[in-house]
Amino acid sequence: MIRELAGQNVCLQRVRLLDPLRQRDEVTDVWLQEGRLQATEPAGIPADVPIIDGSGWVVGPGLLDLYAYSDERVGNDLAHSRETLTSKASGPLARLAAAALAGGFTQVGLLPTPLPGTGLFPVLDHPEHLNRYPRQLGDPRWLPWAALSVGGQGETPTFWGELAQAGAVGFAEVRPLRSLALVRRALEYLRLENKPLLLWAWDPTLAGQGSLYEGIWALRLGLKGIPTSAETAALARLLEVIRSVPSPPPVHIMRLSQARSLELIQQAQAEGLPVTASTTWMHLILSEEAILEHHYDPHLRLLPPLPRASDREALIAGIRSGSLGIATDHHPYTYEEKTLPFADAPPGAMGLELALPLLWHHLVETGSLTALQLWSALSLYPARCLNLDPPTLTPHSDWVLFDPTHPWTVSAATLHSRSQATPWLEKTLCGKVLHTHAEEIPSGSSTP
């Protein structure tokens, strides 16, 4: 990143400015004073400000990731092999913060449970646990999701009122739902707090031990299949429960992967239900045949699995229509943890540093999405899901400088995350975040 922009007084000339809230996509000049955004019009820039030619660069509001795993290992020998929020060895920016800023994210929703398969970090199910997310100068703003149930087990409710008052951004049940009765009780209670619920519609009994959706590719690859109803049936049941509660609080459905699921979400939205949804960035750029192209790379083992090509196109259309947002679902597994046969590897992959450049390359450069549509799905839409102030480019706002043409090689030396769980390791990408500025004091009372 161009770290010399921090604290500088400079004019970025002829940059492409993207502001989804104001629907601005134009080439203009931007004035930075002490690293903060002061003006986005040439007329407001003093004549004596030093100039940097920013032709081809993109300036946009800071990105917001709806959900990511932090998984700081406390008191364990492997603490330094994973990603942490605080680490003396990482200098002023902890590894997770550095990874987020390197990807353009100035706000990050943190899931309340440990990374699947580790169980080493306590579930955020008590108000005092919110103190474990310190923010240092220049870090992204952490948006911690509190666990809906004690231990994230889907049974006993946590202290919802106390957690809401303590600063939880909302309540999450990130494992497949075990009790719709608990969800209904939460919907009835949390409408008073107006805090969103983050839920995953998935039926593990239908999914079984499968690792790819049923169909020609599962047969061709010799992988056990998962019926699409593992997602769609679970989602239909969940939506029926939401419909049964008068004036429910906002509900966000994570990890959508099916065209039919999108239809159900859009139907619910058309009825006026306060339901939003997101898919992960990898489900937008890859479909199931990529597993063969990448020679069964275990970093493509995801849950839900990679979609069929037709479902991927439907998800992209959902982004275009404004029905869906995008999340990284960042899983900071170590390289060793993912180096297993495809079906045995833990599902998930890192994403904070790679999402923007790869989404831009696969979707914007191909014409599948406009630049504004992509930036909106990564900033404006997530903020609305969380009832936060909409990101926009104003004086003293978060901002990102991105060069879509900058080549770089993904490696242990270039990644800020300690995780290397990605199929793009040792591959050269085009597109890199040059600088990310996160304001220290949020603008607006609705931002945590």
Image (spheres, grey):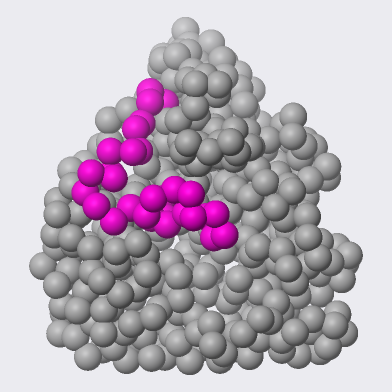
**Residue 102 against residue 317 in the figure, above or below:** above
**Residue 119 located within the stretch drawn in magenta:** yes
Image quarter in which the N terminus is found: top right
Which of the 4 image quadrants contains residue 445?
top left
**Residue 171 located within the stretch drawn in magenta:** no
Image quarter in which the C terminus is found: top left
Which of the 4 image quadrants contains residue 198?
bottom left
Q: Point out residue 144 in the picture as x, y percentages from the top left corner.
A: 34, 49
Total marks drawn?
A: 0
Q: Which one is in front, 393 or 447?
A: 447
Q: Which one is in front, 60 or 163?
A: 163
**Residue 180 against residue 106 in the figure, above or below:** below
Query: In this orientation, does residue 165 appear?
Result: yes
**In this rendering, would 329 be left or right of 40?**
right
Residue at the spot x=54%, y=60% of the render? 116
Which of the 4 image quadrants contains residue 359?
bottom right
**In this rendering, would 173 be left or right of 415?**
left
Q: Point out residue 225 in the picture as x, y percentages from the top left corner.
A: 71, 86
Query: In this orientation, does residue 397 appear?
Result: no
Residue at the spot x=42%, y=57% of the render? 113
Q: Which one is in front, 396 or 79?
A: 79
Q: Which one is in front, 433 or 353?
A: 353
Predominant secondary structure, magenta span: loop
Residue at the spot x=56%, y=15% of the render? 4
Q: Point out residue 61 in the picture as x, y percentages from the top left corner.
A: 44, 42
**Residue 346 against residue 437 in the figure, above or below:** below
Residue at the spot x=70%, y=77% of the render? 211
**In this rendering, would 70 be left or right of 416?**
left
**In this rendering, would 148 be left or right of 100?**
left
* Residue at the extreme top of the image, as rendered: 48
Q: Point out residue 147 in the picture as x, y percentages from the top left corner.
A: 32, 61
The magenta span reads 110-138
